[in-house]
Amino acid sequence: MATNNRIFTSFAVEDSNYRDLLVGQARNAKSPFEFVDMSVKEPWDSQWKTRCRSKICGCDGVIALLSSSSPNADGHLWEIACAKEEGIPVI
């Protein structure tokens, strides 16, 4: 029996529509993965990185959605670097 893998999605806020399409795949009953939603719904506070690191560490992997917006998305780049620091696979 397959187990569900917890996947963290990292993306630039400008690419949220692509993230929504990807997350929609997890709703399929046959999907072997689930997503952790860490979307920023309110302004970042000093605890954001601590909470985000905790979420990333609780996942089996990270999917980073890369686009032309990525180089300017500080939070997105931090999430990818955090996953690498913690030894969490990133694709």
Image (spheres, rainbow, N blue to C red):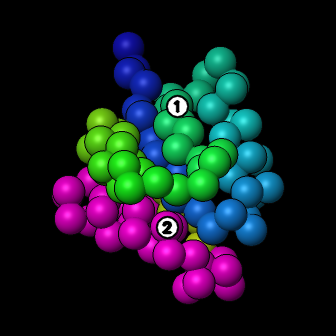
Residue 44 showing in the rendered view = yes
Q: Quadrant of residue 91?
A: bottom left
Q: Is residue 70 left or right of residue 14?
A: left
Front residue of this view, candidates 63 and 85: 85
Q: Is residue 1 above or below residue 34?
A: above
x and y percent of residue 17 in the render? 79, 55
x and y percent of residue 68 in the render? 68, 84
Task: Please provide the residue range marked out in magenta.
Answer: 67-91
Residue 22 showing in the rendered view = no
Front residue of this view, candidates 29 and 81: 81
Q: Is residue 53 above or below residue 2?
A: below
Task: Give the number of the mark in front: 1 or 2.
Answer: 2
Q: Residue at x 56, y 39 (%)?
A: 37
Q: Is residue 62 left or right of residue 85?
A: right
Q: Badge 2 local density, few (<14 within 10 Å), some, or many (20+)? A: some
x and y percent of residue 45 in the render? 46, 54
Check residue 34 in the rendering and tell me which mark sits there, or answer none.
1
Name which of mark 1 and mark 2 comes first in the sequence. 1
